[in-house]
């Protein structure tokens, strides 16, 4: 299967996963590193990781 750059950017660029709840969050990487982005769970965890490419 050929990898289309536009589709790769749409699916994986600026997408992070909350380590506690597993929800996907689209956010600016600089804000994630600075700790300004919070998870959507009850406590709003700040532990996020980048989405893994399959």
Image (cartoon, rainbow, N blue to C red):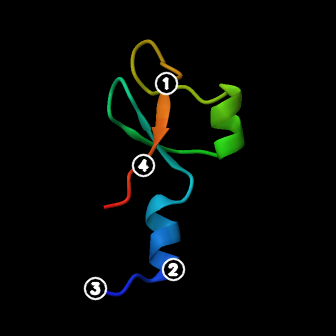
Q: CA distance from mark 4 to mark 1?
A: 13 Å
Q: CA distance from mark 3 to mark 2?
A: 13 Å
Residue 16 lies, in percent from the top left, at: 48, 43
Q: Position of residue 39 (x, y in %)?
A: 48, 27
Label ID, residue 51 = 4
Do labels 4 and 3 touch, CB within 8 Å?
A: no
Label located before the other in sequence (2 or 1) = 2
In the rendered structure, the answer to whether residue 52 lies left or right of residue 44 reads left
The residue indicated by pointer 3 is: 1
In the displayed structure, 8 sits above or below 53; it is below
Q: Is residue 41 above or below residue 28?
A: above
Q: Is residue 35 above or below residue 8?
A: above
- Graded by Cα atoms within 10 Å as few (under 14), some (14 to 19) or many (20 or more), the crowding at tag 3 reads few
User: Relative to residue 37, is residue 41 drawn left or right?
Assistant: left
Say whether marks 2 and 4 touch (CB < 8 Å): no
Distance between mark 2 and mark 4 Cα atoms:
16 Å
Crowding near the residue tagged with mark 2, few <14, some 14–19, many ≥20 C-alpha atoms within 10 Å: few
Name the residue furthest bottom: 2
Circle 4/circle 1 CB separation < 8 Å = no
**Badge 3 element:** loop
Q: Which residue is mark 1?
A: 47
Give the CA separation, mark 3 to mark 1: 33 Å
The residue tagged 2 is 5
Earlier-in-chain disc, 3 versus 1: 3
Q: Quadrant of the N terminus?
A: bottom left
Tell me what residue is drawn at x 66 percent, y 46 percent.
28
> Distance of mark 2 from mark 1, alpha carbons?
28 Å
């Amino acid at each position: 299967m050929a990898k289309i750059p536009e589709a790769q950017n749409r699916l994986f660029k600026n997408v992070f996963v909350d380590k506690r709840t597993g929800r996907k969050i689209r956010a600016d990487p600089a804000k994630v590193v600075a700790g300004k982005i919070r998870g959507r769970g009850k406590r709003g965890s700040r532990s996020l990781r980048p989405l893994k490419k399959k």
